[in-house]
């Protein structure tokens, strides 16, 4: 059956789906795989041969929720677009996402997804790069140095996409940090020891979140969360060399996650138009 003036609205489901207003009553149908009469009441849909309830309110909530998250495409990890973290004076905004991959026996294995968050005030300090392309931004170390040196909070959120023990995670991170500190001082060694202690002896399960937050260029906060947002700081790292080295690990000339740096460059291009 069809009605003159019917209004169709496409929504996202496992199959192409639309809601049609028919005789003032909304109905839902699957045009590619029709059921008994090709039309469903709005309150139900069919999945694997069974009808299940859903509501417009739930669908709207999903739509609103999707606007609050950005999905890292390779790992499907969803990152909130804004975070309020322990030790930060203001909320931070997501600038870009990427993933870390390790190669084992010539096979690339994704270990975690990562997102960089910044204080929005940093953009007012980047006027020299307004109008720059993402490609130019990505190749300009002075811009990333400017972001790091800004006395404003920024945070790297790492979300594991597989189980890994804490020692293995730290060893891989230390393997990237230590070579970037040419002549470590006693303070640097103490900071690295404190950093290591956060992970030692901890089984890090899939979906564990690790927050590495630069309060300023000399001080970092480390928080672990096994379920949602962190409620406290697990360690404070006070070493300009360690803080700088970690930032370089992810956003320097040879980043461990090229996809993250490329995504951040695109975020900066869009923001600095």
Image: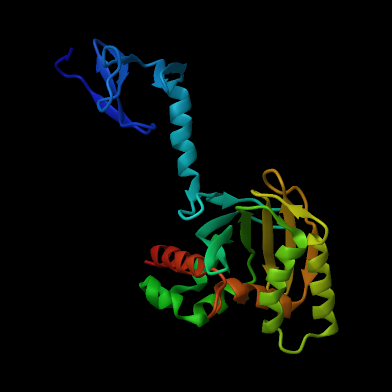
- Depicted 222 relative to depicted 253: above or below: above
Residue 173 located left or right of residue 54: right
Report the residue that reaches farthest toward the bottom: 183
Q: Position of residue 257 (x, y in %)?
A: 54, 68
Q: Position of residue 220 (x, y in %)?
A: 73, 67
Most distant residue in the left direction: 4
Viewer-proximal residue, 107 or 78?
107
Q: Is residue 99 left or right of residue 169?
A: left
Which sits in the foreground, 142 or 124?
142
Q: Quadrant of residue 137?
A: bottom left
The residue under the point 72% across, 47% down is 226
> Residue 115: in sight, yes or no?
no
User: Residue 104: x, y in percent?
Assistant: 59, 67
Apparent side of residue 254 relative to residue 201 in the rendered image (left or right): left
Q: Which of the 4 quarters of the picture holds residue 114? A: bottom right
Which coloring applies here?
rainbow
Q: Can residue 17 be seen here?
A: yes
Q: Is residue 89 above or below residue 126?
A: above
Give me the residue at 81% from left, 73% from top: 191
Q: Residue furthest front?
A: 105
The quarter of the image holding the N terminus is top left
Q: Is residue 40 above or below residue 271?
A: above
Is 164 on the left-hand or right-hand side of 259?
Answer: right
Q: Position of residue 208 (x, y in %)?
A: 68, 50
Q: Quadrant of the C terminus?
A: bottom left
The number of discs equals 0
């Amino acid at each position: 059956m069809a009605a003159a003036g019917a209004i169709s609205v496409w929504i996202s489901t496992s199959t192409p789906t639309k809601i049609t207003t028919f005789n003032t009553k909304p109905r839902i149908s699957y045009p590619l795989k029709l059921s008994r009469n090709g039309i469903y009441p709005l309150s139900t849909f069919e999945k694997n041969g069974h009808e299940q309830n859903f509501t417009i309110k739930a669908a709207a909530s999903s739509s609103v929720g999707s606007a609050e998250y950005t999905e890292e495409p390779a790992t499907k990890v969803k990152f909130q677009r804004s975070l309020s973290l322990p030790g930060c004076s203001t909320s931070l905004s997501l600038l870009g996402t990427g993933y870390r991959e390790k190669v084992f026996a010539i096979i690339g294995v994704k270990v975690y997804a990562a997102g960089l968050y910044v204080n929005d005030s940093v953009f007012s300090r980047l006027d020299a790069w307004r109008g720059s392309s993402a490609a130019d931004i990505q190749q300009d170390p002075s811009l990333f140095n400017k972001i790091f040196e800004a006395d404003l909070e920024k945070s790297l959120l790492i979300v594991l996409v597989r189980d890994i023990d804490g020692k293995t995670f730290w060893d891989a991170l230390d393997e990237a940090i230590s070579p970037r500190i040419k002549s470590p001082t006693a303070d640097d060694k103490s900071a690295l020891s404190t950093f290591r202690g956060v992970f030692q002896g901890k089984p890090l399960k899939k979906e564990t979140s690790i927050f590495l937050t630069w309060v300023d260029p000399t001080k970092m906060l480390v928080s672990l969360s096994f379920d949602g947002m962190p409620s406290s700081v697990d360690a404070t790292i006070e070493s300009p060399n360690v803080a700088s080295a970690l930032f370089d690990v992810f956003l320097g000339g040879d980043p461990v996650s090229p996809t993250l740096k490329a995504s951040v460059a695109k975020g900066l291009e869009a923001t600095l138009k």
